[in-house]
Amino acid sequence: MRSSVKILAALLMIVGLSGCGLGQAETNTASMEGVGNGVDLTSAEVWIQDVTIVNDGDSVGISATAINKSDAENALSSIEIDATALSLVEAGVPTTAGIPIAPDSALRIGFESSTSAVAAATMKTGDYVTVTFTFTDGSIVTGEALIVSKTGHYSTVTTDLPVAA
């Protein structure tokens, strides 16, 4: 009797420890969608997040988010890639007055936004280039950003100059 109890206990332990009694166990893994190759650039008053240069072959645009960390309104006054000045465009209209950013607010540029920064330029996809953001408060934020093709995630980034009316 004692040996049959030991055998039964051993079988229950084997089944329990092997996981056979758990049914169809699945691996619990997280999957994340890529959000971009962008670089983050900062100054004391302004943060620029996820900066990526998007190339369509004839022109380029920027995908980025500018965040005003100060207590006063600021405005994006210019963007340059190496020596190429980009045109700032708001709602399809080029602007030279700058694009305002309220205190503790963000300005999305190029991706899912009515604001863009574009230039007619041919740049090599895969290269890193110097990008400079200048603001009306005197802040200048500079760093290296990757040039990517206007495909996949970046297919909706604005790269074309607005058509003159």
Image (cartoon, grey):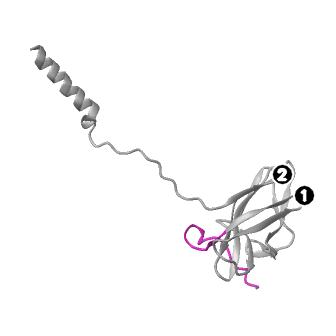
Q: Residue furthest left?
A: 1
Viewer can see residue 49: no
Q: Residue furthest front?
A: 3
Q: Which residues are magenta?
A: 147-165
13 to the left or right of 8: right
Disc 2 secondary structure class: loop
On the rendered image, what quadrant is the C terminus found in?
bottom right
Give the residue displayed 28% in from the left and 43% down from the top.
24
Secondary structure character of the magenta stretch overall: loop
Give the residue displayed 70% in from the left and 81% down from the top.
122
Q: Which mark is residue 111?
A: none
Viewer can see residue 91: yes
Pinpoint residue 123: horizontal percent, then vertical percent. Answer: 69, 78
Disc 1 secondary structure class: loop
Amino acid type indicated by mark 1: Asp
Q: Residue furthest bottom?
A: 165
161 to the left or right of 17: right
- Binning the other alpha carbons within 10 Å of mark 2 as few (below 14), some (14 to 19) or many (20 upward) gives many
Pinpoint residue 12: horizontal percent, then vertical percent. Answer: 21, 27
40 to the left or right of 83: left
Q: Which residue corresponds to mark 2?
A: 45
Could you tell me how many numbered marks the image carries? 2
27 to the left or right of 35: left
Residue 163 is a magenta residue: yes
Quarter where residue 18 is shown: top left
Q: Which residue corresponds to mark 1?
A: 137
